[in-house]
Image (cartoon, coloured by chain):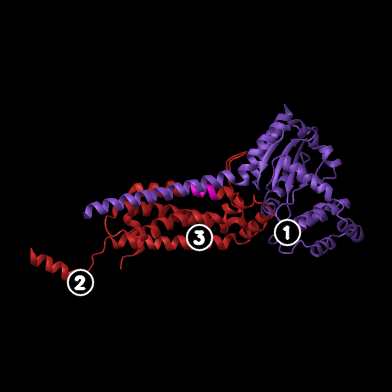
C-alpha cells in the first residue's frame, strides 16, 4: 500500500515537473515570438523585400540632406550611416558615449563615412518635444552640440528632464544659438511633420526599436546593411570595411 | 548543522546535475544578455560589456546561475526523495523555484514584451526600465530563498529523526520483535 502511494506520488511529481518545464518553454518561446526585436525583424524582412527600390532613392546622401536631416562629415563620403534614435533611449546614449566617438574618429573625420540623424521618438511621451527642439537647433547649425548635450544629461524616461522648460534651458547653454529664433521654431512645432515622416520612414523599414542603423552607399543609397541596437565598434567596422572593399573593386 | 555547501556538494558531485545546471543556465544567460544588448549575432557575433551595463550583467549572471542550480537541485530531489513529499511542498518548492526563475526574466524580457502594447506599453516599459535593477535584485532574492528551501529539502532527507516519540517507537518496535 505504502509503496503504491509513493509510486503514485512520484508519478504526480513527475507530471507536475513536466508541466512546469512545458510552461517554462512556452514562456520563453512566447517571449521570443512576441518580442519587438523578433517582430521588427520579421517586419523588416517583409518590408525589405517589398521596398528595395524605394530605399535606394530615399537614402542617397544628397536626398537625406535635402530633407533637412542633420548630418556629420563630408558630403563626398562614399558611405552613409543613417541613425534612427530617441533622445530618451538609454541604449542610444550608450551608443553615443561608447561607439560613435570611435566611428567619428576612424571614419567620419577621415572622410570615408557621413552620419545622418533620423528622428525616432518612441521611448516616452516627452521624446517628441526633445526631437522638435533638436531639429530647431539644426536650423542654426547647432544640432550636434544640442544632441551631445541631451545625451550627456540624459535621465529617466519622462522624468521631466526634457520638459519644454528644460529643453529651452538646454538650448540656452549652447553658445551662438539665437534664442528667439529657437523659441519660435520650438513653440510652433515647425518640424512636427518632418519628424512624423522620419517615424514613418523608420516603421516602413521595420525599425521600432532604437537605436537602429542603415549603412548605405552615399551616391544612390543602394546596398543597405542594417545594424540593430547599440552594437560595439567592431560590428560597424565589419560592415563599413566590407562596403569600402566593395567600392574599391 | 549541515551547511549549504554540503547540499550543493551532494548534488553537484554527480556530473549529470552539473550538466543539467549548465544546460539550463547557459541558454538563459545568452537570452538575457541578448535582450540587454550585450550579445549580438548580426552582423558579427560579439559580446560587449559597456560600463553602464556592468551592474545589470552581474545580476543577470547571478540569476542565471541560480536558475540552473535550482532546476538541477529540484530534479535531484524528485529523483532521490522517496518519502515525505507532499503535493503542497512540491508546489512550494520545485514549482515555485522554477517559476520564480522564469519570472526573474520579467525585469529584462518583460520590458521588450510589454513595449508592444501602445501607450500603456510605454508606461509599463518605462517603469520596467527605471526599476530594472531593483527588479533583478528581487528576482535574485526570490531565487536565493528557493535555493535555501531546496537545500533544506535535500539535507532533511539525510538527517535522522531523534525526536523522543520517534525514538520510543523505534525501541518498542525492536522489543516487539
| Mark nearer the viewer, 3 or 2 | 2
Q: CA distance from mark 1 to mark 3?
A: 31 Å
Identify the residue shown where x is 68% and y is 61%. Answer: A156
Marks 2 and 1 sit apart, C-alpha to C-alpha, by 70 Å
The tag on residue B139 is 3
Residue designated by label 1: A152
Label 1: which secondary element: helix
Which chain is tinted red?
B
Residue B165's tag is 2
Q: Which residue is most to the front?
A: A1
Count of labels in the image: 3
Residue B163 in the image: above or below residue B38: below
Which marked residue is nearer to the observer: mark 2 or mark 1? 2
Looking at the image, can residue B81 be seen?
yes
As for residue B29 lying within the magenta part, the answer is yes
Give the extent of the magenta segment: B27-32
Which chain does the numbered disc 3 sit on?
A: B
Q: A159 left or right of A139?
A: left
- On screen, residue A210 versus residue A17, left or right, reads right
Rate crowding at label 2 as few (under 14), some (14 to 19) or many (20 or more) other CA atoms within 10 Å.
few
Mark with earlier residue (3, 2): 3
Q: Which element is circle 3 on? A: helix
> Splitting the image into 4 quarters, where does residue B41 fall?
top right
Q: Position of residue B37 (x, y in %)?
A: 60, 49
Q: Share a chain, discs 2 and 1?
A: no
Amino acid at each position: 500500500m505504502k509503496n503504491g502511494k509513493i509510486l503514485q506520488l512520484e508519478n504526480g511529481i513527475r507530471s507536475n515537473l513536466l508541466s512546469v518545464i512545458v510552461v517554462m518553454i512556452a514562456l520563453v518561446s512566447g517571449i521570443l515570438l512576441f518580442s519587438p526585436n523578433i517582430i521588427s525583424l520579421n517586419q523588416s524582412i517583409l518590408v525589405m523585400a517589398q521596398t528595395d527600390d524605394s530605399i535606394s532613392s530615399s537614402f542617397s546622401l544628397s536626398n537625406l540632406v535635402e530633407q533637412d536631416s542633420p548630418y556629420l562629415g563630408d558630403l563626398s563620403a562614399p558611405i552613409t550611416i543613417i541613425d534612427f534614435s530617441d533622445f530618451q533611449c538609454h541604449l542610444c546614449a550608450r551608443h553615443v558615449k561608447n561607439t560613435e566617438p570611435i566611428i567619428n574618429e576612424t571614419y567620419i573625420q577621415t572622410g570615408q563615412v557621413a552620419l545622418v540623424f533620423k528622428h525616432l521618438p518612441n521611448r516616452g511621451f516627452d521624446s517628441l518635444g526633445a526631437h522638435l527642439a533638436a531639429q530647431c537647433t539644426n536650423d542654426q547649425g547647432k544640432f550636434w552640440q544640442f544632441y551631445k548635450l541631451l545625451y550627456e544629461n540624459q535621465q529617466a524616461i519622462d522624468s521631466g528632464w526634457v520638459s519644454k522648460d528644460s529643453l529651452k534651458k538646454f538650448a540656452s547653454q549652447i553658445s551662438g544659438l539665437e534664442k528667439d529664433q529657437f523659441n519660435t521654431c520650438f513653440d510652433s512645432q515647425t518640424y512636427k511633420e518632418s519628424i512624423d515622416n522620419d517615424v514613418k520612414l523608420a516603421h516602413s523599414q521595420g525599425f521600432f526599436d532604437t537605436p537602429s542603423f542603415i549603412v548605405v552607399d552615399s551616391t544612390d543609397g543602394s546596398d543597405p546593411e542594417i545594424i540593430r541596437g547599440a552594437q560595439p565598434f567592431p560590428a560597424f567596422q565589419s560592415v563599413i570595411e566590407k562596403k569600402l572593399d566593395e567600392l574599391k573593386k | 548543522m549541515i551547511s549549504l555547501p554540503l547540499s550543493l556538494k551532494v548534488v553537484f558531485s554527480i556530473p549529470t546535475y552539473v550538466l543539467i545546471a549548465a544546460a539550463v543556465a547557459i541558454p538563459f544567460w545568452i537570452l538575457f544578455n541578448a535582450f540587454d544588448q550585450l550579445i549580438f549575432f548580426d552582423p558579427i557575433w560579439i559580446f560587449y560589456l559597456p560600463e553602464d551595463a556592468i551592474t545589470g550583467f552581474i545580476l543577470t549572471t547571478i540569476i542565471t546561475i541560480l536558475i540552473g542550480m535550482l532546476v538541477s537541485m529540484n530534479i535531484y530531489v524528485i529523483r532521490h526523495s522517496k518519502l515525505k513529499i507532499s503535493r503542497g511542498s512540491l508546489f512550494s518548492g520545485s514549482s515555485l523555484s522554477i517559476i520564480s526563475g522564469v519570472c526573474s526574466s520579467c525585469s529584462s524580457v518583460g520590458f521588450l514584451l510589454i513595449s508592444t502594447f501602445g501607450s500603456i506599453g510605454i508606461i509599463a516599459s518605462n517603469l520596467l526600465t527605471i526599476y530594472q535593477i531593483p527588479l533583478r535584485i528581487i528576482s535574485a532574492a526570490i531565487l536565493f530563498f528557493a535555493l535555501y528551501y531546496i537545500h533544506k529539502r535535500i539535507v532533511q532527507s539525510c538527517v535522522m529523526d531523534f525526536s523522543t516519540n520517534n525514538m520510543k517507537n523505534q525501541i518498542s518496535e525492536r522489543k516487539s520483535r
